[in-house]
Amino acid sequence: MNDRFREIPARIDQTVKILEEMNARITHFETETLPLLGRTSDAVLIPVQLIENGYTAVETLFVRISAVTRIPAAVPSRRALTARAGRQGQPAFSCPPRAPGARERRDC
């Protein structure tokens, strides 16, 4: 088993703690700060920033999990196709035909 799999539960716990802290801050904002500031367009920026921070924490968790559990691509890359074709004496990978009037593609 990959050692990086073992770090996933710790990353999940870390993210849950961050989300709990964000929830506590939003609750504090609703009960303590909002009555002082009132319902203004400036006051809404505080919970929006807290929600954005929580979203970023969850997104980072998913990126880290996907990096650990990445499955190799089922479709070989163009470089792999070109190398394979060269070893087998076949023509190298070629680009699809251009549409009439289209400029030549530099990546092919």
Image (tube, rainbow, N blue to C red):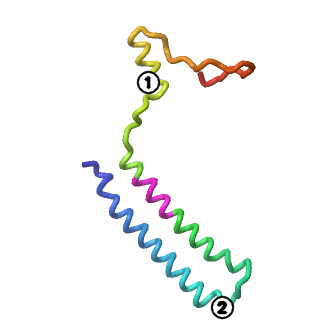
Placement of 3 over or under 74, stated as above or below: below
Counting from the top left corner in percent of width and height, residue 21 is at 48, 77
Residue count near mark 2 (Cα–Cα under 10 Å), binned few <14, some 14–19, many ≥20: few
Q: Which residues are magenta?
A: 57-65
Which quadrant: the C terminus? top right
- The part of the image, by quadrant, that contains residue 8 is bottom left
In the rendered structure, the answer to whether residue 47 lies left or right of residue 75 reads right
Placement of 93 over or under 41, stated as above or below: above
The three-letter amino acid code for the residue at tag 1 is Ala
In the rendered structure, the answer to whether residue 83 lies left or right of residue 44 reads left
Q: Is residue 64 magenta?
A: yes
> Do callouts 2 and 1 mark residues in contact (Cβ within 8 Å)?
no
Label of residue 80 in the image: 1
Q: Residue at x 69, y 80 (%)?
A: 43
Q: Residue at x 48, y 58 (%)?
A: 60
Q: Which residue is mark 2?
A: 35
Counting from the top left corner in percent of width and height, residue 81 is at 45, 21
Label of residue 103 in the image: none
Chief SS of the magenta region: helix
- The part of the image, by quadrant, that contains residue 89 is top left
Q: Residue furthest front?
A: 100
Q: Nearer the viewer, residue 98 or 29?
A: 98
State the SS at label 1: helix
Placement of 78 over or under 27, stated as above or below: above
Counting from the top left corner in percent of width and height, residue 52 is at 58, 67
The three-letter amino acid code for the residue at tag 2 is Pro
